[in-house]
Amino acid sequence: MSTNETAAPAAQSERIAQHRRYLMCRPQHFTVSYSINPWMEPSRPTDTDVALRQWQTLYDTYLALGHEVELIDPLEGLPDMVYTANGGFLIDGIAYGAKFRFAERAAEGPAFMEWFRDNGYTVAEPAEVNEGEGDFLLVGDTILAGTGFRSTGDSHREVGEVFGKEVVSLTLTDPRFYHLDTAISVLDPVQGPSTGSGAGGVERANIAYLPSAFDEEGRGILAERYPDAIQVDDADGAVFGLNSASDGRNVLISPRAKGFEAQLRERGYNPVLIDLSELLLGGGGIKCCTLELRGGTR
Ligand code: ARG
């Protein structure tokens, strides 16, 4: 972990870290035995011990930052279960379950729903294909929802019905960025009141995003709603720089996303560099390994 406290600009003291509760899954069975995204090459060897060590650093960093991390037991035969972001989407004690696009991950849906139930969440069983927080991001009181590769447009309607919130659909067009959380990073999910929702509303909560991952309509929506967003360049996007986790102050990012790191520093965030190169062989990064638990009994 490298927090670079000494290089911090003065503005950083204004950013306040918010407490987070996350769900993670140890990559005990991690390997790449099938390919459901362009990053996965089953012929290329993976090293589960390296994956475990890198994952442990992420886990330890969350704890060191004062966050809580719950664990779900890894199941044999489900090598992608480490990417807990896809297991569901949780707000205020309600868990909207995942229904995976590909058969290889289908069994993860019920496994996560069981964990949510056992841990005090009311589960909304999904009728539509959706991959949880991989494609749904809560920004202020709005749900940004991705489609194009995994979650369907019908799941956007369903997630809106489950939570009673505004849903903004965004279409992803580059197969390398197949989940919304590979192209958008939520920097300040709750800080600052929203000054209006609905069409044309301007949100105070801020994001970073990769414009080239979206179709023209999506780029237009993002530019209009988030005029202060950090627009990340293609080189940083290509190393999964956007697949990051923020508590409003500390932003955990890939050490390879150099430009994004500088942009974050300029804005007064504290970039924390975490290398998950082994897990990138499965097409996942920091955010993919992190599911936010909002509400619930504990
Ligand atoms: N191998 C996994 C898949 O293709 C990676 C999931 C990454 N998760 C994410 N939230 N982007 O489904």
Image: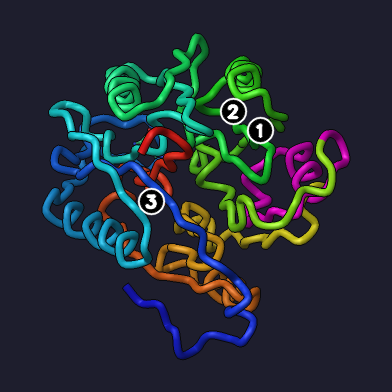
> Would you identify the image quadrant in which residue 136 lies?
top right
Callout 3: SS: loop
Q: Which residues are magenta?
A: 198-224
Residue under circle 1?
171
Tell me: 206 left or right of 246: right
What x and y, as percent, mark residue 247?
50, 59
Q: Label 3: few (<14), some or many (≥20) within 10 Å? A: many
Q: Identify the residue at the far top of this view.
A: 127
Q: Is residue 24 above or below residue 262?
A: above
Q: Is residue 172 above or below residue 127?
A: below
Q: Is residue 19 above or below residue 179?
A: below
Mark 3–mark 2 distance (CA, rounded to whole Å): 20 Å
> Would you identify the image quadrant in which residue 204 lies?
bottom right
Q: Nearer the viewer, residue 217 or 223?
A: 223
Tell me: 270 left or right of 45: right
Q: Which of the labelled discs sits on residue 285, or is there none?
A: 3
Q: Which of the labelled discs sits on residue 77, or is there none?
A: none
Callout 2: SS: loop
Q: Is residue 217 magenta?
A: yes
Q: Disc 2, ligand 1: is the CB inside 8 Å?
A: no
Residue under circle 2?
148
Q: Nearer the viewer, residue 21 or 120?
A: 120
What x and y, as percent, mark residue 169?
69, 30
Q: Nearer the viewer, residue 94 or 220?
A: 94
Contact (CB < 8 A) between labels 1 and 2?
yes
Q: Earlier in the sequence, mark 3 or mark 2?
A: 2
What x and y, as percent, mark residue 179?
51, 37
Q: Colour mode? A: rainbow
User: Quadrant of the image for the C terminus?
Assistant: top left
Mark 1–mark 2 distance (CA, rounded to whole Å): 5 Å
